[in-house]
Amino acid sequence: MTQFHTAPPAACLQHPRRLSLALLAALGVASVAPAWAQDASGTDTPADADVTTLDGLKVKGERAEGYSVRRTTAGTRFDLTAREIPQSVSIISHQRIEDQGLDDIIDVLENTTGVSNTRTDSERFEFYARGFYIDNYQFDGIPTTMVQNWSYGDSALDLALYDRVEVVRGATGLLTGTGNPSASVNLIRKHADSRTLTGSVSQTFGSWDRRRTTVDVTTPLNSTGTVRARVIGSYLDTDSAVDRYSQKKSLFYGVIDADLTDNTQLSVGYDYQKKESDGVTWGGFPLWYSDGSRTDYSRAFNPAADWTYWDTTVKRAFATLQHDFDNGWKLKANATHDKTDVSDKLFYPYYTIYGFDKNTGAGVVPYSGYYITGRKVDGLDAYAEGPFQLAGREHELMAGVSYNRREYRNTGAYDFPGPLDTYLGWTGDYAEPDWSPISVYSTGTVTQKAVYAAARLSLADPLKLIAGARYTDWKVDGTESGAPYASEEKKTIPYAGLVYTLNDTWSTYASYTDIFNPQTTKSADGRYLDPTTGKSYEVGVKGAWFDNRLNASMSVFRIEQDNLAQATGQYSSSGEAIYVAAQGTVSRGVEFELNGELVPGWNATFGASRYVAKDGEGDDISTQLPRTTLKAYSSYTPRGLSALTFGGGVNWQNRIFYSDATYGRFEQGAYALVNAFARYRFNQHFSVQANLNNLLDKKYYSQIAGYGAYGEPANGSVTLTYSF
């Protein structure tokens, strides 16, 4: 049962690059690279073109090639190949984002190995890995926490300004501090990486009158190109498969990248995103009638009233300064400030008090809410990393400090009259309430200060040990329903990972870290639950081929937690959900992923995940999440027809269920979603791409926890792109 009163329901690798390839990779336009040769100096040039020599451009950060990157700092801050990292890592590259037509974070995580999701309503999607909620996100490595209970629009962040997404599964306390042992999601921004004027314009037309325009331009700001700017703008206007639901999204992103010296780079940027959704749902449609039989709504049914909306505006500024010393050390500092403002008017068809009568339609209560919420986040992260000599061997050391301050204010009003005469034949025609004065529900400041350090020790030529720790000082101070509260927790989180290189292809690893996550959920007596604590273990084997263009991994994990909050289905007199702290919760499972270039022109990803998660009593937790998932996608460019790229994939998940104390179990059977795409490049400037989603038109529930919603039926889009 869903809460309903006081809150809505609940790289650094430095290396010269070929300028044209840098442009193509940044724009994600080319299907294959042109033929290249080397001149007398060893510089790559087109084999069939006149040579124009430009000043070299040093690029900070590894660029994705196809579906993979050769090196990444994900998980450790050390610049490593995927098989040198002692955890499971998935890279969703810009090329894959383009091939699949992924527009936002929801799209990316739904297609990431080992990640599953559930939803609360049309605007709030919650993602999980290994059975636990994902609350740790990073922007260019700066950690922040995102929660969906008041929905600040995090799950709908537009991908147009991001080059790729890195997902490290398991506990990531070394770099993110507090959080669940699920995964950490790092969004890597696009930068101005061309010293000549380049850009692209794309226009997408899709099902339900979907229209999306994106402009992406990079230009030098001085004659030498040491100062460059990139501007990205995007606008989306679409209806949906659900009656009366529509959405508009606006995006502006600007960044300036400057080479202050040969070894010092500065980036400053700003992004603005606005999402306007009308006809939004809150909860979903009733799953049961009062006699226990199931409802049977059409996929187009909208349980909301006509006047509902959910508008979110996010403004984010950031700066990054990096200096590389001649001895191999580097110093990097990131700072960010973001402000989020949300306004929404919502309609919730509450039916579990009286029961929804199958014959008369009586028993549904029109609970309505009007909310104005806001959040400010300031983040700072600075670290140094480099080599050192000890006992005749070279090792690496990384140390840094981190600061994160999150302020929030949630206000609103609600209307909760008696049951409707009938909910049968619902069309959304319901008068907007005469709202009472706005009240303050909760305010607060969450501060997290941390210092962290890790060493990558070369114990022997094939054996590397990464050992480190993070000391975190976490504090919250605020009010909840008018009552003040405060809490402070301090914890040192150890981390250790051992990697043994078997040969040029294979390596094995084992890793361990503690779990520490303060909680803001309450018990029946109104006290906050103690922090979740526990341990996370992982062992695995990894392989890499073709100079790390193709990577594979298989891992086995075990996560042990105490004090894990579990909803009781009961509510306090103020409408807050009541939780109990489950002891002895264990999640264990296995994951496999193959990602990258199989042969020239053929990129593919395949991921499989299986886990079981039970509390100390042996009962399953989070049963609304699939225990087994398979996700595959592939693109192919025929060698004799390089203008054409085509492919597709499938996402499969096993059976899930939700148990309700009144109505029993609601099951969603196993299902698969099939997708496909094709792209044709008419010339070096113009291309057209078609994407088809849910090709077999599978009807399935995307939400079953108390209320229902369907996933999208078969749909498609066509994108026209002009690049220069």
Image (cartoon, grey):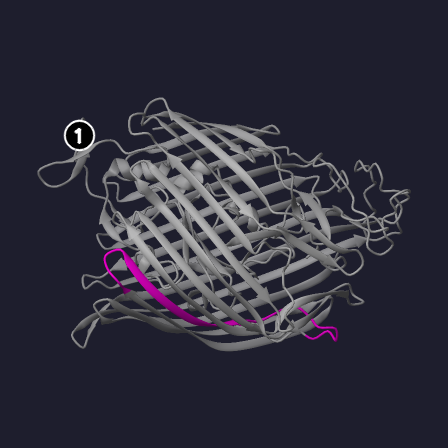
Q: Quadrant of residue 195?
A: top left
Q: Is residue 159 visible?
A: yes
Please state the horizontal and vertical placement of residue 708, each as a whole percent of the image.
71, 47
Is 585 displayed left or right of 576 in the figure? left
Image coordinates of residue 174 in percent, x first then y, are 42, 68
Residue at which label 1 appears: 47
Q: Is residue 705 left or right of residue 614?
A: right
Query: Does residue 195 appear in the picture of this structure?
Result: no
Q: Is residue 83 above or below residue 724?
A: below
- At label 1, the amino acid type is Ala
The image quadrant where one finds the C terminus is top left
What is the tally of numbered marks visible in this picture? 1
Q: Residues within 10 Å of mark 1 (few under 14, many from 20)?
A: few
Q: Where is residue 320? Give x, y as percent.
A: 37, 55
On the picture, is 227 further left or further right than 653? left
User: Residue 316's x, y, as percent?
Assistant: 49, 51
Q: Does residue 653 appear to the left or right of 39 in the view shown?
A: right
Please report the bounds of the magenta region as a residue range.
501-527
